[in-house]
Amino acid sequence: MLPSLLLFILGLSFGSFFNVLILRYSPDGKLFRFKNLNGRSHCPKCLHELSAGELIPVLSFLFLRGKCSHCGQKISWFYPFTEIVTAILFAGVPLFLNAFYGVSGIVFWGFAMPLWYYALVVSWLMIALTFLVIALIDFRYYVVPDELNIVLIVFGVIVSLLLFFHGNGILPFRTSFLENYMMVFSPTQNVLVNHFIGAFAGGIFFELLVLISRGKGIGFGDVKLAFASGIALGWPDIGLAIFLSFVLGGLFGSILLLVQRKGMKDKIPYAPFFVIGVLATALFGNALIYGYFKMFGM
């Protein structure tokens, strides 16, 4: 319990950093530019520089009742939301992976596991955090920075290599979040091949959508995101994530049209739905496929 609490608190701090990273980002510039990250945080309306007490993640928002202490300007919900979700990922990803891979939580936190397992957990955590930042940036700016796709590729390669060389150290069929159904949808059980297929399938599928829609429905940024995510998730996980993202995006878009919040020509950011699809695949992928087959008596 204590390690998870410490990770949750550490996650709040990282969430505060992500707020700075995201809110100071300029879509026509680089994400990790020192100029954007340098300088004190301040109120966007009155430019009041925030004190240390006003920068405590989540608690400052609550104590200030969501308003600037100097001018009373409302503070966006975006700040505490990012901090809380980041903290949940910091604490939740290791616990989820311990259960998924069949590792005892006590043994893990006792630092008795091999080094490769810690590297695997950290790599998946980095991938989860990157997906979060991608979703939030696309939600605000309708763009996915190339730097974040590169991060997905790097840690996706690390995950695939670790699972390839050490997959026998975890529960059977756990190189995919679809578990045993991987054998149904994949032509091979080779981890490296499946991650290569995932990148190819994701990139080619979205590239075809760009060509068919002539760039009006899907942008090239989505192609790069699908390619990078395919490397990170592998096949067939990326296929289910894409399917779920289209279903969720279609439902949400239809609701916005019905309530007249959006028109047919208005933009809707795709990355948030894609990230939700990835999350659903990781948490419920096996159960969703099982329910689908059971529905048809298979």
Image: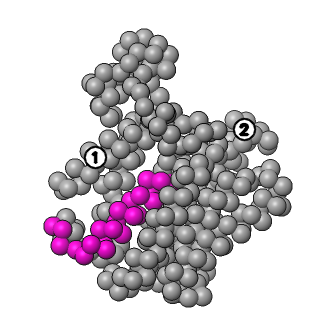
The span shown in magenta is: 110-131
Q: Which mark is residue 262?
A: 2
Along the horizontal axis of the image, is 37 left or right of 60?
Answer: right
**Element under label 1?**
helix
Along the horizontal axis of the image, is 7 left or right of 124?
Answer: left
Indicate whether 89 appears above or below 171.
above
Indicate whether 174 appears above or below 212.
below
> Residue pushed farthest front?
34
Which of the pair 38/278 is nearer the observer? 38
Residue type (three-letter) at the residue carrying disc 1: Leu
- Specify whether residue 82 is in view: no
Q: Which of the image's four quarters has the N terminus?
A: bottom left
Q: Position of residue 71 (x, y in %)?
A: 42, 11
Magenta-colored stretch includes residue 121: yes
Residue at the location (79% across, 43% down)? 264
Query: Badge 1 is on which residue?
Result: 10
Q: Which mark is residue 183?
A: none
Mark 2 neighbour class, 10 Å CA radius: few under 14, some 14 to 19, many 20 or more: some
Q: Position of residue 203 (x, y in %)?
A: 67, 66
Residue type (three-letter) at the residue carrying disc 2: Lys
Mark 1 neighbour class, 10 Å CA radius: few under 14, some 14 to 19, many 20 or more: some
**Element under label 2?**
loop
Residue at the location (51% across, 60% down)? 152
Residue at the location (36% across, 15% down)? 69
Mark toward the viewer: 2 or 1: 1
Q: Which of the image's four quarters has the C terminus?
A: bottom right
